[in-house]
């Protein structure tokens, strides 16, 4: 029986099951299907693992290009600056002397997927398949993490060269507009919140499975529900949280330290929860999920409690989903320098 079902709202197949079922990472679901002898389901789930990865990959591909375009549009951008930055970041994020090349790694990931599917269908023994599934996850982790760092590195360069206020410009005027338009349009006031709310929570869980959250980097997270909200926590988030904490998988430090020297907010800004120590990568969550929807719709899509560097770099990141968007606390507006409209 298929593990997936077609969603007319999202216009794609999604994972079946209640919230507890959704919290099982797609990586682990593949292992379970293989262990239970459901090889067709395992093949289907391998495809979905790649679909989850593709969403992240496409965003990073777009964002990195958009951030570089922001640099190119600055009047004091100098000849060769962008090519030099790309070269420096690729070398910094390389492995075993090979510069980071996201396109080549993405092709390699698809080749791994194709080989794994052939061997699942061909009856390969379970120990070999378990090893190859883990190698697929690890190959995605290395690509994903380096692409996060690549985007973060460009944002830090923008701050170094043009002032950290330009980080908001890079997001709002170059990177986020299209993403907000196509990924979050379903949560606008013209749609019924009762129908939109479970989709919003599903997308949070799906995206964080793809980011390979959790200490094992399997795509695991914590989930809490009460009468007024659903909270999803990441320990750590596989993107921004890993950047602030450092990477135990590869033994590398927080990205604020050598050899990276990426930056966090030095002053409070409304586009970064008016907090110091927010990673420039993490700031997109404030802009995308709180600030823009508050400005355009009068309510946030999600409410976030992010870690900060260095004092709270090991804190979990919390995504809070309010079941009634009219009951979001006024302090959410206030911390962004806004006032909640009178109901």
Image: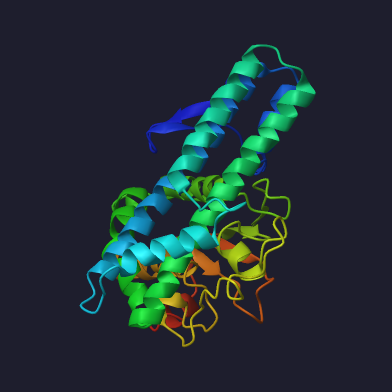
Query: In the displayed structure, would residue 210 be above or below residue 68?
Result: above
Q: Residue at x 79, y 25 (%)?
A: 127
User: Residue 16's spot in the image, x, y percent?
Assistant: 57, 31
* Side (left or right) of 223 relative to 270: right
Query: Residue extending furthest front?
Result: 97
Q: Residue 316, can we see it?
A: yes
Q: Residue at x 59, y 66 (%)?
A: 243
User: Residue 60's spot in the image, x, y percent?
Assistant: 42, 53
Query: Residue extending furthest top?
Result: 122
Q: Nearer the viewer, residue 102 or 84?
A: 84
Q: Residue at x 63, y 70 (%)?
A: 254
User: Residue 25's spot in the image, x, y percent?
Assistant: 65, 41
* Side (left or right) of 185 relative to 127: left
User: Residue 265's spot in the image, x, y percent?
Assistant: 48, 81
Q: Residue at x 64, y 80 (%)?
A: 310
Q: Residue 341, can we see it?
A: no
């Amino acid at each position: 029986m298929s593990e997936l079902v077609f969603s007319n709202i999202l216009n794609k197949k999604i994972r079946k099951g209640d919230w507890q079922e959704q919290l099982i990472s797609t990586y682990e679901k593949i292992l379970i299907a293989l262990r239970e002898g459901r090889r067709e389901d395992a093949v289907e789930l391998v495809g979905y693992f790649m679909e989850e990865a593709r969403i992240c990959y496409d965003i990073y591909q777009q964002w990195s290009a958009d951030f570089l375009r922001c640099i190119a549009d600055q009047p004091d951008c100098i000849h060769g600056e962008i090519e030099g930055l790309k070269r420096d970041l690729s070398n910094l994020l390389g492995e075993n002397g090979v510069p980071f090349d996201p396109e080549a790694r993405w092709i390699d990931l698809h080749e791994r997927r194709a080989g794994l599917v052939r061997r699942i269908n061909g009856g390969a023994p379970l120990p070999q398949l378990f090893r190859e599934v883990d190698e697929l996850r690890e190959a995605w982790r290395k690509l994903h993490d380096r692409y996060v760092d690549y985007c973060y590195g460009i944002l830090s360069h923008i701050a170094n060269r043009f002032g950290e206020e330009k980080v908001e410009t890079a997001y709002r005027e170059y990177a986020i507009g299209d993403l907000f338009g196509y990924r979050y349009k379903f949560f606008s006031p013209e749609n019924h919140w009762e129908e939109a709310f479970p989709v919003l929570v599903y997308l949070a869980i799906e995206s964080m499975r793809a980011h390979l959250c959790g200490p094992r980097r399997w795509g695991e997270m914590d989930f809490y529900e009460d009468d007024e909200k659903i909270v999803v926590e990441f320990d750590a988030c596989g993107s921004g949280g890993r950047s602030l904490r450092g990477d135990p998988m590869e033994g590398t430090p927080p990205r604020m330290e050598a050899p990276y020297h990426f930056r966090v907010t030095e002053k409070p800004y409304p586009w970064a929860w008016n907090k110091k120590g927010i990673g420039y990568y993490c700031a997109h969550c404030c802009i995308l999920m709180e600030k823009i929807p508050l400005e355009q719709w009068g309510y946030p899509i999600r409410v976030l409690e992010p870690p900060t560097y260095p004092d709270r770099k090991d804190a979990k990141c919390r995504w809070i989903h309010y079941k009634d968007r009219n009951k979001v606390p006024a302090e959410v507006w206030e911390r962004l320098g806004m006032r909640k409209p009178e109901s």
